Amino acid sequence: MRFWKKLSQQECSDYIDKALRENIDFSRRTSLGIPASRLDGKVFYDQASFLKDAPFLRSIVQNPNHIGCHTLSESEMFFKGTQQIERDLIEMIAVDILRAEEGGSDGYVAAGGTEANIQAVWIYRNYFIRTFNATHDEIAILASADTHYSVVKAANLLFLDLYSVPVEDSTRAIQEAELDAVVRRAQQDGKKYFIVLSNVATTMFGSIDDPDMYARCLLKYDLPFRLHLDAAFGGFIYPVVQPENNVGFRNEHVSSVTLDAHKMLQAPYGTGIFIARKGLMQHVFTKEASYVHGMDITLSGSRSGANAIAIWMILVTYGPYGWYEKLHTLLYRTQWTCRQLDEMGIVYYRHPDMNIITIRASFVPKSLVEKYGLVPDTHEGDAGWYKIVVMEHVEIEYLQQFLADLKRVPGA
Ligand SMILES: Cc1ncc(COP(=O)(O)O)c(C=O)c1O
């Protein structure tokens, strides 16, 4: 690990304090121009004694605005201390989790996975327009049928057609021949440029697409493409537990990645992450944003610097080995549950490196769905599948109870 190191609570707190001191202190420095201040002191009391031991809450009270992208150019100097933490964070994830070259990536903390996915499609749409003089109707988005619906939002917002690639029902895998057929159909529709969203753990199944399969198919037809990995759920799991993977920047076909810290990392909401190879973010530069110092190149404008601090704190508090151990505990619970399901003859899907178990609905009585908060693949009509996500709070005891109930009550 180059940048991802475990820090003690004190080291962590000192680093954040130093960063906060380098930001503007609204109580000491007159800043007449910026429409920002710390949190309202009448409402959010900032002298509470517990704040001294809570660096994240201290950063919330100071309220740094991380507008812009800090890996790329100069940014607002009022918040330069905490912007450095965001830069540290992006480099740590890009290099140590996604195996990027040092200094080879840009990125920022987005509102969530939805924003990060839309940011990717926005960049590549503009890239094809600028580089190839493409028209909107010549650009297609390609994604599996199990892809998160944020891709549908992206297609709608950016006036692009989405081509959905079917997956095989029990393995949730894209079949090369089906992909081929979809690409040929898109070509017949006049599509010449492709934006691929390849999943590193789909929302419902935790299944992982093979980005190289997309690349093989598009290269075969000599079609220009850009490939984005939606690792919103799996980004902090799969590349960590499975070092032999093709879902990072060592894969030349991968241009960018979404990760969500507010999923597996249990960070506060508002902690999506977008990371791209250098040279790509510029395609969404909004030159009209002239009052912002630096380049406004992100879908969201103002965004809280405290969110970057929260993600950074989680990663350095665990350190790479602590995180690896935690993941293995969750994977162990998942595996244990799968073994019980096997013994009971219950049909489910699970990727071996993931903590999601998706059970065929016909094996799950309706009464247990509500009791155990199982999530269906659809809320419209009959569900085909129900999923269990083995997060930290999903302890073996709860899983045991669920399995005992499942044994007792026959299928739906
Ligand atoms: C694979 C995947 N991508 C994107 C998203 C969207 O993330 P968010 O809700 O943070 O916008 C989700 C959310 O569940 C997801 O599972």
Image (cartoon, grey):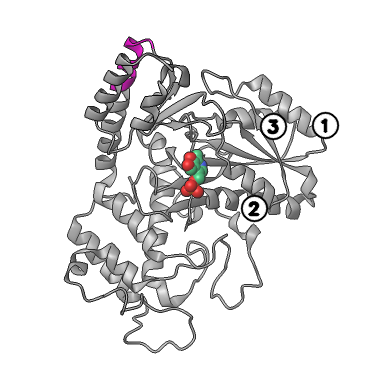
Instruction: Please say whether residue 340 is one of the residues in the magenta stretch.
Output: yes
Can I make out residue 194 in this image? yes
Q: Which amino acid does label 2 sit on?
A: Trp
Range of magenta residues: 336-345
Task: Choose between 59 and 219: the one closer to the eye.
Answer: 59
Question: How many labels were placed on the picture?
Answer: 3
Q: Which amino acid does label 3 sit on?
A: Leu
| x and y, in percent, of residue 56 in the image | 29, 63
- Do labels 1 and 3 touch, CB within 8 Å? no
Q: Residue furthest front?
A: 367
Say which residue label 2 marks: 122
Which numbered disc flags the more N-terminal residue, 1 or 3? 1
Disc ID at residue 188: 1
The correct choice, above or below, for 25 with respect to 342 in the image is below
C-alpha distance separating marks 1 and 3: 17 Å
C-alpha distance separating marks 3 and 2: 22 Å
Which residue sits at x=28%, y=26%?
A: 399
Say which residue label 3 marks: 219
C-alpha distance separating marks 1 and 2: 24 Å
Circle 2 residues within 10 Å: few <14, some 14–19, many ≥20: many
Tag nearer the camera, 3 or 2: 2
Q: Which amino acid does label 1 sit on?
A: Gln
| x and y, in percent, of residue 66 in the image | 45, 67
Which residue sits at x=26%, y=47%?
A: 319
Which residue sits at x=47%, y=34%?
A: 201
